[in-house]
Amino acid sequence: MSLPRPKSRSNSAAPSPSLSRKAGTRSPATPKDYPEETFWTKVGTLGRKKKTDEVQEVENEGKHAIDSPGMPKSAEMPPEEYQLEENEERSMIEPKSFENPKFKELIKVLIDWVNDELHHYRIIVQDIEEDLYDGQILQKLMEKLTGQQLQVPEVTQTEDGQRNKLRIVLGFANHVLGLQRGQAKWSVDSVHTKNIVSILHLLVALARHFRAPIRLPEHVTVDVVIVTKRDGILLHRVIMEELTSAYDDLGLKQERDAFDTLFDHAPDKLQVVKKSLVTFVNKHLNKINLDVYDLDAQFSDGSFEEKVTNVGLAFELMQDGGLPKPKARPEDIVNLDLKSTLRVLYNLFTKYKHLS
């Protein structure tokens, strides 16, 4: 970045010579009448020029890394993004990816879903990066989705406090999602530094896991520019990151059925249906000294991983017995989704209601 050149002074703009004591005469201007360029002035000027040259060098280095031959895309990154420590790495979405209609749609769908979930808290998300990085809204979202209260400070302004909060919230999310160490595509650092790719990966995983009533656009990809500093030189590479893939029933809004109508328009009849299914279930479970009284919770027991395994095995047995593949997932039953539980039990009822 070059500094603006000083404007040249015209004769008329020169400092006025001093008046002599004798009225009507002027004495010639002397060098002392002009500002003297001292040693310290020269040092200050050289210092500023050196600082400017350093900034220019960093800018040029970064621009060369991003726009060099062989780089298929051009990413406009602010100069401060290039000031990396040795072996430090930064990543950003290639700006043209933001114009991808499917990418825009994914962001809109996820923002609408989060806002629907959190309307009770009067929380409105407008920007995924700016609104979710500190863990506050993510905490509320996890509490709403799971029905569990997280023991974290409600409001924290310090960076350390935000990171500690994120560590608890993301750890809880990873546990709920059944992810082992190193499997998550997000981290405390990536979320807190507003890495939109990491945040979108997290929201997509949560939306699919909790069977959000939304239709995620399929095959959404973005180009990610990764810049690394090695031996004082900025190196770059571009990778294609897949945010969503092809889905069958996962993460997609299902066609409405009788249970959707029951929940939406006839909640008074829901208790009648539940009572009928409890009677059916107990007629068969009593033979092995088991009893069901709460459809909302009793079909979920054991640790999370054990629950999913057990329900998955039950689904396989149903299909072996000639029942259609359940619309629900094992995770839906484990997450106490009543509508999914009723669907599964109703399929069993229609097939085996004639048995005594």
Image: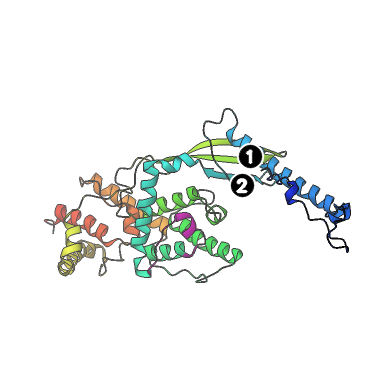
Residue 165 versus residue 219 in the image, above or below: below
Q: Could you tell me if residue 27 is visible in this image?
A: yes
Label 2 or label 1, whichever comes before in sequence order: 1
Q: Which SS type dominates the magenta stretch?
A: loop
Q: Residue furthest top?
A: 70
User: Where residue 320 sits in the image (x, y, percent)?
Assistant: 25, 44
The image quadrant where one finds the C terminus is bottom left
The answer to whether the residues at label 2 and label 1 have Cβ atoms under 8 Å apart is yes
Q: Position of residue 75 (x, y in %)?
A: 54, 39
Work out which quarter of the rendered image holds the N terminus and state it: top right
Look at the image and say whether residue 237 sits in the magenta stretch: no
Inspect the image, locate mark 2, and give the three-letter code of the amino acid beneath it: Glu
Instruction: Tell whether 58 sits left or right of 116.
Output: right
Q: Is residue 126 magenta?
A: yes
Question: Mark 2 and mark 1: span between their CA atoms?
Answer: 8 Å
| Type of amino acid under label 1 | Gly
Q: Nearer the viewer, residue 14 or 145?
A: 14
* Dot 2 crowding, Cα within 10 Å, few <14, some 14–19, many 20+: some
Q: Is residue 163 left or right of residue 345?
A: right
For residue 140, which numbered disc appears in the image?
Answer: none
Which residue is depicted at the point 15% across and 65% down?
266
Which residue is located at x 34 percent, y 47 percent?
216
Q: Secondary structure at mark 2?
A: helix
Task: Specify whether 275 is left or right of 330.
Answer: left
The magenta-colored residue range is 122-136
Residue sitting at the far front: 24
Q: Which residue is mark 2?
A: 81
> Residue 47 at x, y = what percent?
79, 49
Residue 62, disc: 1
Residue 268 x, y percent position in the rendering? 16, 70
